[in-house]
Amino acid sequence: MTSIERTAYPRFKRLITAHELHLFFSPTWEEAAWAAERMDADGHQLSLLLALKSYQRMGRFPKPDEYPEIVVDFVRRAVELPEGTTSLWATGRTAERQRTEVRRRVGAMYDQARARRIAEESIRKEAAAKNSPADLINIALEKVVEAGLELPAFSTFDAMASTVRKEVNASICAGIHDRMSAPERAGLLRLLEERQSDGTTLFNRLKKPAQGPTWSHKNLAKRLEWVDGIGDTGVWMDDIAAGKITDFAGEADAVTASLLV
């Protein structure tokens, strides 16, 4: 699972300054009147205003337990609700009606199917060149926001990025496999099967950094000849983004390092 902190998914900051509270969470007198017209109980007015200001800031409805106490208390005091007033969160159809009221006021569109479709299309397109799930999620967020749609839950973006990334990477690997000749594929398998005198495989030899090209390192030319003999990697990697190749190599190194721990 991708850490939400690594993405641009909108959420409450751990530390919210007084300036940010006034800038993003101060209800206008019109908004306060709007909430009072729709809700009789002080707690319901507070929850409606919290939902409104948070949606204006983040483009989504946070869960009740996401709201920091400092934000709740600031909004309560801003509209002069009694001390000790707590937000009363509606459930079921009442909660959906409240969300509909907020969407109407901010002019937002609620179409989760379209939002997911836009997100998936953007992730699939970018996954051909980018490999980081956080980067893919950020691109999807940008496209959904541009479309003026309410954001799906972070778990939706995370699961989608993981699934689509796997599909795209599998397709890339299948393409590499298909561009290899049968002898080249057999040669790669031998790298894992044949062992050198010290017990390591030829794959370990392949990963070992080459020595510098000085006169004292006469084996460099022989090593390069051996590597080139494995196959034409230029053909194998045809049309694959350079960044994608670099990420694949980094992941391979990470897996190797984990096996050594």
Image: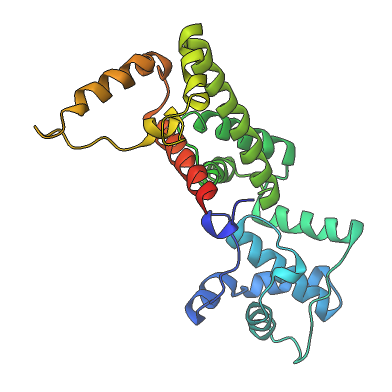
Q: Residue 103 at x, y = what percent?
A: 71, 53
Which color scheme is applied?
A: rainbow
In the rendered image, the residue lying farthest to the left is: 215
Give the camera-side residue of 152 and 1: 1
The structure residue drawn at horizontal position 38% and vertical position 14%, both measured from the top left corner, is 231
The structure residue drawn at horizontal position 40% and vertical position 16%, both measured from the top left corner, is 238
Give the camera-side residue of 138 and 48: 138
In the rendered image, the residue lying farthest to the bottom is: 83
| Residue 34 in sight | no
When the figure is inspected, residue 210 is found, relative to residue 222, above or below; the finding is below
When the figure is inspected, residue 255 is found, relative to residue 71, above or below; the finding is above
Number of numbered callouts drawn: 0
Q: Residue 137 at x, y = what percent?
A: 56, 45
The structure residue drawn at horizontal position 70% and vertical position 62%, both measured from the top left corner, is 62
The structure residue drawn at horizontal position 27% and vertical position 18%, both measured from the top left corner, is 225
When the figure is inspected, residue 238 is found, relative to residue 123, above or below; the finding is above
Quarter-of-image position of residue 167: top right
Quarter-of-image position of residue 232: top left
The reply, left or right, for residue 162 in relation to residue 187 is right
Q: Residue 162 at x, y = what percent?
A: 63, 40
| Residue 182 in sight | yes
The reply, left or right, for residue 76 in relation to residue 16 is right
The reply, left or right, for residue 207 in relation to residue 185 is left
Q: Residue 134 at x, y = what percent?
A: 53, 48
In the rendered image, the residue lying farthest to the front is: 197
